[in-house]
Amino acid sequence: MLEGLNPFVFASTPSKLNPLETYFLKPNMFPLIVFTLLSHLTISSCSASLHADFHVLVALKNGFQFPESLLSSWNSSNPSSVCSWSGVQCYGGRVVSLDLTDMNMCGYVSPQVSRLDKLTNLSLAGNNFTGNIEIANISDLRFLNISNNQFNGHLDWNYASISNLEVFDAYNNNFTAVLPVGVVGLKKLRYLDLGGNYFYGTIPPSYGTLVGLEYLSLAGNDLNGKIPGELGNLVNLREIYLGYYNVFQGGIPSELGNLVNLVHMDLSSCELDGPIPHELGKLLLDTLYLHINLLSGPIPKQLGNVTNLVNLDLSHNALSGEIPPEFTNLKQLRLLNLFMNTLHGSIPHLVADLPNLETLGLWMNNFTGVIPENLGRNGRLQVLDLSSNKLTGNPQLCGSLLNNPCNFSAVTSTPRKAPRDFKLIFALGLLICSLIFATAAIIKAKSFKKNGSNSWKMTAFQNLEFTVSEILDCVKDGNVIGRGGAGIVYHGKMPNGMEIAVKKLLGLGTSRHDHGFQAEIQTLGNIRHRNIVRLLAFCSNKETNLLVYEYMRNGSLGEALHGKKKGAFLGWNLRYKIAVEAAKGLCYLHHDCSPLIVHRDVKSNNILLDSSFEAHVADFGLAKFLVDGGASECMSAIAGSYGYIAPEYAYTLRVDEKSDVYSFGVVLLEMITGRKPVGEFGEGVDIVQWAKRSTNCRREEVSNIVDRRLTSVPKDEAMHLLFIAMLCVQENSIERPTMREVVQMLSEFARHSLDSQSSSSSSSFIQKKF
């Protein structure tokens, strides 16, 4: 109506309009009228849009499972408060960011999430969400992080509808199918991580068109085929990860030498063969990992041109020739691993002169001659292994690693041999501890039921549909399913049908109700890995501490191997699968937790099997609580279980992750032989000594010790498993691999289809038999 009026005519004509109408039709007020109407429409539109966002967030919340206090700010009855909800940020009256990182929630993500069409940031990382997820029609989305969950299905999304995406992180989920080709339409993508899933097939050559990428990880999948040379077109790439469980045919494409901005290349453990391309010498790398492959030929001298190199690992290949003299240029080098190749010649003096070298692994090669006398004089060398070569001794070689400190070093040497009667002391000590624990358990049992549930406090680490009282009902003698140094384990079934295992910790009373203990329990409760037993809750009062775990229906590996059924139903394929899974669990504790967690009591009884015989590592960290809390004189003096304890503990009384590696090696020997760690080989002889003696330290003699209850075993796999076990139980801790390296080595022979029930029938085997 206003468009047809001339305000100047009305201003000069006597008006019969009421005063309000006259005011709005004054000439200088017309722009204000239009502005007011547009503002009103805009505010109404924003309010309606924010209300729609509110309903989407409520739908998301309904799909989540979480402790009530976690999203207490998400008031479903107050739409106007949505911008103050935890994890929610608004701009211009719309939700633009949803960050639910590391909240340890379960459940599923409603497909309505795609109705938050003004999101620029969406992070669901570090939870336990399951099911399918699809993100679409959010054109402003820049950052998407769904890593470290249990999402499944595929990622065949409509990527054209999220074309502004810059960061896409889907690491460590359960996605399957081939790699999504649609991501090549994301021309602004700078970060792409699809690693740690179950993608199969080949890497699409079209991934080479993502020229804006700075980070690419496809590691830890089931990929095969060749690495496409087109990846060499990603000239802005700074980090690339393609190894770990992938099985590629062919070698490293020389085109990767065109990645002029690359600083980190990791192509480890993916069966690459052929030579190392000399074109890699043109790069600006600080890290080059090519270990555990089938690479052959000499080490390219051009790698000596990569003067920024800090970490170089070419170990566990078939490389030949000598260490190139050009390596003298690698002044920044801290890690040099060339072990398990066929290198020959002398160890050049240039290696000893590298000023920043901290780790040097040259073992299991064909090196000859003397050891450079300056080796270790840089004052930085921490890890040194030159074993299994043909070297001539050098009495002047110095360094704390060799128990011969240099003049300028304050490091003192430590004895290498444990007392001869150390195992006898262990046996007597453990016997005394058993009596102490038994007495303490009786006393605690008498007073336990006197405490009412009102005095108990429960900390839940996920949404639980049962109470403290219902947990306490399980803690009775008739429900005991296990006893050990850490405590008594009870089995319980909750009213909702969920089965749980309740561990009552022994020797931890009021002294443990401090912030340090609570913080460590919180750390354990936050751990999420498919091969680690999940801690559901922690219950405590002034006298007792209870840990509530998910129940493992098939008991422990120790019971399966040595119990009533004597391992008869654990066929070779299943044992190998369990070894891989348990190694992955320990690897996660050592390398992916912050801070790292040392288990301290790795043994077959602490590897539990679920209804599908999938392995789960249990009781991690508990030995530390018992030692720190002074649970008993036994536990304060002994970390671990008899037969699994690393030899260096005898004179250091300290444990670290390499102690866990030794214990895991004993577990591997148990699975190979079907025997217990001690008690079957004569007085003073354990399974490690017996296995070395029976095989003459030769893996080819593995048939001398393999479990006779197994009707047939692939000899190459048995040899490989024995080889890994013997690496793990090296007397010198620095010679043992890390758990990450153990996982890599085990994966070399891991199969895609494993018999999860029984492999006792010879028809299940197609490889060479004993």
Image: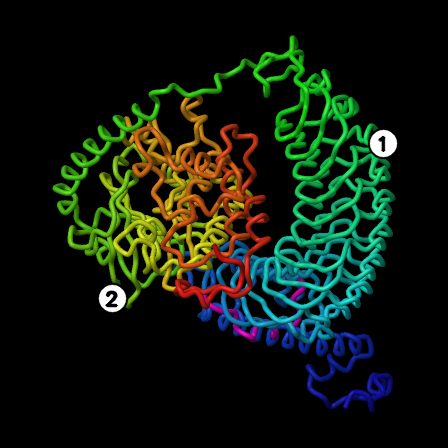
Q: Give me the residue at 30% from left, 24% from top.
A: 424
Asked whether, in this view, residue 511 is left or right of residue 596, the answer is left
> Please, which residue is most extreme toward the top here?
407
* Image position, residue 374 (x, y; %): 73, 16
* Magenta span contains residue 111: yes
Looking at the rendered structure, the secondary structure element under dot 1 is: helix
- Residue situated in front as seen by the camera: 52 or 365: 365
The tally of labels here is 2
* Image position, residue 303 (x, y; %): 82, 39
- Residue situated in front as seen by the camera: 121 or 499: 499
The kind of residue on which mark 2 rests is: Pro
In this rendering, does residue 81 appear at all? no
The kind of residue on which mark 1 rests is: Glu
Q: Give me the residue at 67% from left, 68% from top.
A: 201
- Residue situated in front as seen by the camera: 112 or 443: 443
In this rendering, does residue 151 appear at all? yes
Residue on which disc 1 sits: 326
Q: Give me the residue at 71% from left, 68% from top.
A: 140
Residue on which disc 2 sits: 495
Looking at the rendered structure, the secondary structure element under dot 2 is: loop
Quarter-wise, where is residue 653 in the image?
top left
* Image position, residue 619 (x, y; %): 37, 45
- Is 584 above or below relative to 371? below
Magenta-colored span: 107-121
